[in-house]
Image: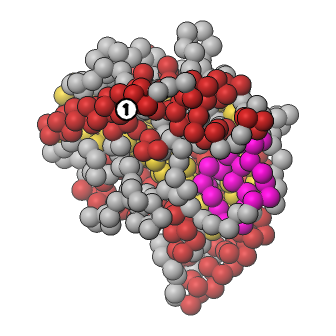
Amino acid sequence: MTDLTELTAVRLADGYRTGALGPVEVTRAVLERAGRVQPEVNAFVRLFGEEAVARAGESQERWRRGEPRGPLDGVPVTVGDLLPVRGHPTLRGSRTVAPEGPWDEDAPAVARLREQGAVLVGKTTTSEYGWKAVADSPLTGVTRNPYDTSRTAGGSEGGAAAAVALGAGPLALGTDGGGGVRVPAAFCGVLGMKPTYGRVPLYPASPFGALAHVGPLARDAADAALLLDVVGVPDARDGSALGPAPGSFAGALAQGVRGLRVAYSPTLGGQVAVDPAVATAVRRAVEGLAGLGAWVVEADPDFADPVAAFETLWSCGAARAAQRLGAARREELEPALRELCRQGAGRSALDYLAAVDVRRELGRRMGLFHETYDLLVTPTVPVTAFAAGAEVPRGSGHRRWTGWTPFTYPFNLTGQPAVTVPVGTDEAGLPVGLHLVAARHHDALPLRAAHALLTAGLAGPPPLPSGPAGETRATADAAPIAG
């Protein structure tokens, strides 16, 4: 029998259309799977339970009448707990957020999902205020990797990535300010996308400003493109939102990669030390792109590591978020986040504007780079998932998460679209991600390349080691779930 939790959103919609599947049975199966894996990986802040089943029932009736609201009607979707969902607390992984609310407004992407009839099944764990690249927070504890629960799921959207990997919903929405969608997607063996800045509107505005993007997580490119088609539309509440997309992202997937000009940069010109297993898996996939008809050369983008500028902007954003809390509540923040806030508060306006200048120059350089190359390909992360509960790999010498994410945060500075797709594992069976970056406004290109790799069997989620997590042992730090 088909396991309903392993079906993609596209296949679910096909089943609803023919009557072979019903949104209620699918939603109940997803909720059951989510509850079963929660003690093992700690992916959820809360599940919406019977509320989700009730929305699925309404969807089922629409499908029966032949009147679905859209292609995601009845499809289960999870939402990272940095994005507001009407009627449920958005706690941002922090004890500083008052649960009582009011919680009376959806984020734009959530509103589009609700309008389309998608079934919101729960909110997933993040780092506190999304500040670091692992999903550990004072409020919900440690989120663990589905492939090895002694390892991190990555972050900030580790709960979303783990949920998709384990079948607790085929689709997820998350935020990406320096890799928040792409890093956990790479660690958990799923696809994650950061669209062009403004393609998916964001409200309330992030304190991290234009670094913050909203994007999909899925098991394949077809699902991610479908979700982007739904949420990537203007919203009056976001003054930075782009106009309507030039066409359907899902419809562009079949164009493939033949003739695309691809620059493969394995180490950003020697700036990044990459784990050999990661390098091997990524190179194999790049060779696969060439075999599919892309024109591939080794070429490095013309920039030095912009980490200092990124950390200036990032720390100022953190300080701004904390400023709204007041001095007493700030003491409840995670110690490392408090330190980041102090650093940001100590920066001057000239420091900030100097970082903005670096950002603009980086954008100029990448704009020129993409006049020659359609896609830049790198590893997503130079390492695979490391010990859970740590911000950096032990023994790495890095002090902060930016030390081991040099392939992701530069493209938050530039606002470019980027997709990570799983392309193999290391010797321990931990997933490896390939990173595809395109010029601004060319969001279809990295999705097309990911789709080509997936359909050719050159990419895809690795098999989980021994069935769904949660069936073997429980961990003591799993967060309680509110219904």
Determine the secondary structure under disc 1.
Answer: helix
Q: Which residue is drawn at 77% across and 41% down?
A: 95
Q: Is residue 417 magenta?
A: no
User: Relative to 407, is 270 on the left or the right?
Assistant: left
Residue 477's image quarter?
A: top right
Q: Give the quarter of the figure containing the N terminus.
A: bottom right
User: Which quarter of the picture shows residue 253?
Assistant: bottom left
- The segment highlighted magenta reads 79-101
Q: Can you give x and y, in whole percent of width and height, for residue 432 in the image?
A: 48, 30
**In the rendered structure, which amino acid carries the disc numbered 1?**
Leu
Q: Nearer the viewer, residue 359 or 23?
A: 359
- What secondary structure predominates along the stretch shown in magenta? loop
In this picture the colour scheme is secondary structure
Q: Residue at x 28, y 66 (%)?
A: 247
Q: Does the magenta stretch include residue 91?
A: yes
Q: Where does the image place residue 132, in percent across and percent down from the top left?
A: 59, 32
Residue found at the very far front of the displayed protein: 349
- Does 51 appear above or below 367? below
Residue 200: x and y in percent read: 43, 57
Q: Residue at x 65, y 44 (%)?
A: 324
| 79 relative to 229 in the view: left or right | right
In the visual, does 37 lie left or right of 281? Answer: right
Q: Nearer the viewer, residue 39 or 95?
A: 95
Mark 1, residue position: 353
Relative horizontal placement of residue 11, taking residue 265 as reference (left or right): right
Residue 426 visible in the picture:
no
Q: Is residue 324 visible?
A: yes
x%, y% of residue 119?
A: 63, 68
Instruction: Give the position of the C terminus as an image quadrant.
Output: bottom right
